[in-house]
C-alpha cells in the first residue's frame, strides 16, 4: 500500500476515534481547563501518552498556565487544590493509577484522558474524557501503525483542538503571549 494511503488510514482512524467523544463531557472539560489558568497543573502518563501530555503541557505553559511534568527534577510537591492530568489508553497503567490515587489522597483534583470507559483509572479520577473505540469504525481494531494504538494520535489532535478553543477570539493576543513564553535558549 502506498504511504499516502497509510497516512489517510491513520487520519481517518484518529478522526473516527475523536468523533466518539461525548460532546457534553468535551465541553465540560474545556470549561474546566479555562478555569484552571490560575491553578498549578501536573502531568503524568507513560510511554507515548506521556509524550503527548508533555506537548500539551508545553503549549499550556506558552499560554501562561503554571505546569509541571511529574518526574522532572524541577517538579514541586503536589498539594490540595492542584490539578493532576493523566492519560492512559488502557486505563490501567500501574504507575498512572498509583500517582492518580496518591494525588487524590493529597487533595488534588485528578483528570484522566482514557482510551475507553469502564477502567480502573476512571474510578479514581474526579473527571475524565474517554474515547469509545467500540463505536469507531477502525479497520484494524486500533492496532495499525507499529503495534500501537490510535489513542495517542487522537489524544494529540484533541489537545491541539483544546488549545485552539482556549485562544478562540483572542488569537493575536494569545500568539503574543505564546511568543513571550516560548523558549529562547535554543
Image (tube, rainbow, N blue to C red):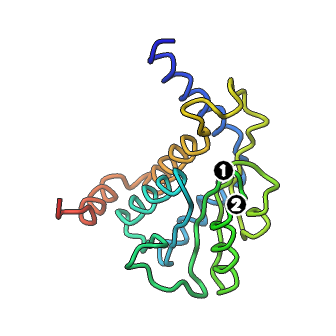
Mark 2: secondary structure: strand
Of the 4 image quadrants, the one containing the C terminus is bottom left
Residue closest to the eye, 80 or 25: 80
Asked if the residue at tag 1 contacts the one at tag 2, i.e. Cβ–Cβ closer than 8 Å, the answer is no
Residue 121: image x %, image y %?
73, 63
Q: Is residue 1 above or below residue 110?
A: above
Q: Residue furthest top?
A: 1
Q: CA distance from mark 2 to mark 1?
A: 12 Å
Instruction: Residue at 67%, 73% (x, y): give it.
Output: 98
Instruction: Residue at 47%, 73% (x, y): give it.
Output: 71
Q: Of the residues under marks 2 and 1, which one precedes in the sequence?
A: 1
Instruction: Residue at 51%, 43% (x, y): give it.
Output: 157
- All told, the count of numbered labels is 2
Estimate how packed mark 1 is, as few (under 14), some (14 to 19) or many (20 or more) residues with alpha carbons within 10 Å: many
Task: Name the residue that disc number 2 marks.
Answer: 128
Residue 97: image x %, image y %?
69, 68
Of circles 2 and 1, which is in front?
A: 1
Q: Residue 129 lies in what quarter of the image?
A: bottom right
Mark 1: secondary structure: loop
Q: Which mark is residue 89?
A: 1
Q: Residue furthest left?
A: 185
Residue 165: image x %, image y %?
50, 52
Q: Residue 62 lies in what quarter of the image?
A: bottom left
Q: Which mark is residue 120?
A: none
Horizontal side of 76 relative to 180 (left or right) equals right
Horizontal side of 135 relative to 61 (left or right) equals right
Q: Is residue 89 above or below residue 178?
A: above
Amino acid at each position: 500500500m502506498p504511504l499516502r494511503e497509510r497516512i489517510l488510514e491513520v487520519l481517518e482512524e484518529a478522526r473516527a476515534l475523536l468523533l466518539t467523544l461525548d460532546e457534553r463531557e468535551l465541553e465540560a472539560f474545556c470549561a474546566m481547563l479555562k478555569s484552571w489558568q490560575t491553578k498549578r497543573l501536573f502531568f503524568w502518563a507513560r510511554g507515548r501518552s506521556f509524550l503527548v501530555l508533555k506537548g500539551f503541557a508545553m503549549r499550556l505553559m506558552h499560554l501562561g498556565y503554571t505546569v509541571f511534568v511529574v518526574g522532572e527534577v524541577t517538579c514541586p510537591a503536589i498539594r490540595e487544590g492542584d490539578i493532576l492530568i493523566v492519560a492512559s489508553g488502557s486505563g490501567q497503567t500501574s504507575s498512572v493509577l498509583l500517582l492518580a490515587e496518591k494525588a487524590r489522597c493529597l487533595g488534588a483534583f485528578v483528570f484522566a484522558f482514557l482510551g475507553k470507559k469502564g477502567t480502573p483509572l476512571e474510578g479514581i479520577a474526579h473527571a475524565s474524557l474517554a474515547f469509545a473505540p467500540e463505536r469507531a469504525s477502525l479497520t484494524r481494531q486500533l492496532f495499525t501503525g507499529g503495534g500501537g494504538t490510535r489513542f495517542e494520535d487522537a489524544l494529540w489532535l484533541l489537545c491541539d483542538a483544546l488549545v485552539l478553543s482556549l485562544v478562540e477570539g483572542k488569537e493575536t493576543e494569545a500568539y503574543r503571549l505564546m511568543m513571550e513564553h516560548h523558549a529562547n535558549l535554543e
